């Protein structure tokens, strides 16, 4: 597995990223209606090329990706068949080498993700309600 910054993703790469994104959101957020995520597809597909994309790959397959906007992690998504193999940690470690501080928002109910970020050195900064889903979320921050 290799991590790298993906510049100007091709249509095929965008298809892989979107497939990973949708499957990841549906699996990690059963407390949010699936239709919400499907409605976000056009906006996310349009936004991905503008984000700094750190991808984990093996041969020509994308295993997972991290979307970075400045020092804000918009999300970490790993294919289901590649989870629990260090992909998310590798993506996060690559982002940590590029930034001295990082922050993200994560749903409180996504306990696995909250535990992962705590284990990775992030601390809860504040709790709020995501106005689009009405779900409680943490803003978590990490500093080198």
Image (cartoon, grey):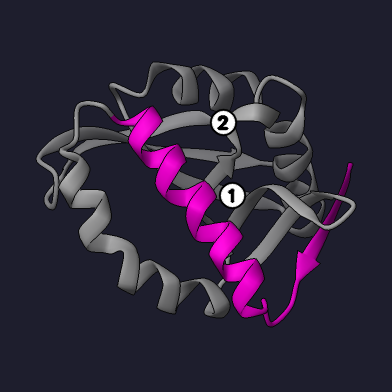
Tag 2 secondary structure: loop
| Residue 120 can be seen, yes or no | yes
Prevalent SS, magenta region: helix
Q: Are marks 1 and 2 in contact (CB under 8 Å)?
A: yes
| Percent x, y of residue 26 | 34, 36
**Residue 102 marker:** 1
Q: Residue at x 73, y 78 (%)?
A: 7
The stretch in magenta equals: 1-29
Separation of residues labelled 1 and 2 (CA atoms): 8 Å
| Residue 121 can be seen, yes or no | no
Q: Nearer the viewer, residue 93 or 31?
A: 31
| Percent x, y of residue 34 | 21, 41
- Check disc 2 and report the residue beneath it: 122
Tag 1 secondary structure: strand
Q: Residue at x 70, y 42 (%)?
A: 92
Tell me which label, 1 or 2, sits earlier in the chain.
1
């Amino acid at each position: 597995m290799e991590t790298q910054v993906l510049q100007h993703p091709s249509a095929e790469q965008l298809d892989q990223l979107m497939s990973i994104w949708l499957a990841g959101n549906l699996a990690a957020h059963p407390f949010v209606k699936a239709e919400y995520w499907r409605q976000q597809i056009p906006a996310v597909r349009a936004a991905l090329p503008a984000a700094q994309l750190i991808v984990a790959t093996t041969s020509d397959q994308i295993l997972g990706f991290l979307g970075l906007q400045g020092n804000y992690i918009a999300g970490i998504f790993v294919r289901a068949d590649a989870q629990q193999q260090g992909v998310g940690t590798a993506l996060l470690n690559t982002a940590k080498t590029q930034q001295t501080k990082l922050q993200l928002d994560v749903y409180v109910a996504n306990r696995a993700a909250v535990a992962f970020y705590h284990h990775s050195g992030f601390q809860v900064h504040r709790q709020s309600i995501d106005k689009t889903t009405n779900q409680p979320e943490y803003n978590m921050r990490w500093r080198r």
